[in-house]
């Protein structure tokens, strides 16, 4: 089911194949009952595409949360970043304060989402593996571009995904790690 709620290309692809088949059958046979069938399939296709837009999966919420965190970091909005961290994640909160003081972030770009694992439990948890490119201005006056692999652990609380733990590593290690799994 997730392939239909996350990837509308499946809906479009299957819909086009069915409609083309029905149109071909109509042109070959001239059977008039196929005309309303073609209309019904087209209406179903539109309905499924509308439904796909309305359904927001956990994976889509997680990607949106990550994008919101990245934009807050770029803006230098520490309070917005902290809103995405679970209050019990003391080390993550500490690191957010430290990085905020140490660096002036210019761009934070998720360049490669390696995988998202959602655990349907109570409360729901998730893990995201990705590569991030960060461009920073150092407090010493220099500039630096950093490419890192990151694993985020998140917890869903009150319908919001919150970071509870993270690990960062050289991006090459993340690439090796992902290809070995």
Image (cartoon, rainbow, N blue to C red):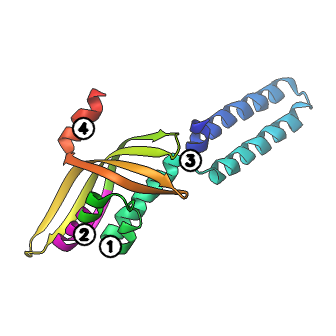
**Residue at x-position 34% and y-position 49%:** 152
- Residue 96 on the magenta segment: yes
Label 2, residues with CA under 10 Å away: few <14, some 14-19, many ≥20: some
Q: Answer yes or no: do the residues labelled 1 and 2 have beta carbons within 8 Å?
A: yes
Image x and y of residue 11, in percent: 64, 39
The quadrant where residue 71 appears: bottom left
Q: Is residue 43 left or right of residue 146?
A: right
Q: Earlier in the sequence, mark 1 or mark 4?
A: 1
Query: Quick one: quadrant of the N terminus?
Result: top right
Q: Which residue is mark 1?
A: 78
Residue drawn at x 65%, y 33% is 14
What is the x, y in percent for residue 15?
69, 36
Q: Earlier in the sequence, mark 3 or mark 2?
A: 3
Residue sitting at 13 percent across and 68 percent down? 143
The image quadrant of residue 87 is: bottom left
Of label 3 and label 4, which has the lower sequence position? 3
């Amino acid at each position: 089911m997730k392939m239909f709620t996350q990837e509308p290309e499946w809906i479009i692809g299957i819909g086009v194949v069915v409609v083309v088949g029905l149109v071909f059958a109509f042109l070959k046979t001239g059977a008039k009952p196929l005309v309303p069938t073609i209309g019904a399939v087209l209406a179903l296709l539109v309905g499924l595409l509308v439904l796909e837009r309305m359904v927001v999966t956990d994976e889509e919420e997680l990607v949106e949360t990550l994008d919101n965190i990245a934009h807050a970091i770029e803006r230098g909005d520490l309070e917005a970043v902290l809103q995405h961290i679970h209050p019990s994640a003391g080390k993550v909160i500490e690191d957010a304060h430290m990085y905020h003081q140490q660096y002036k972030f210019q761009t934070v770009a998720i360049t490669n989402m390696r995988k998202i694992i959602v655990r349907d439990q109570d409360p729901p948890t998730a893990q995201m593996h990705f590569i991030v490119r960060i461009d920073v201005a150092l407090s010493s006056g220099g500039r630096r571009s950093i490419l890192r692999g990151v694993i985020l652990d998140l917890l869903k609380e009150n319908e919001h995904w919150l970071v509870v733990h993270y690990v960062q590593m050289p991006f090459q290690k993340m690439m090796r790690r992902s290809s070995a799994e």
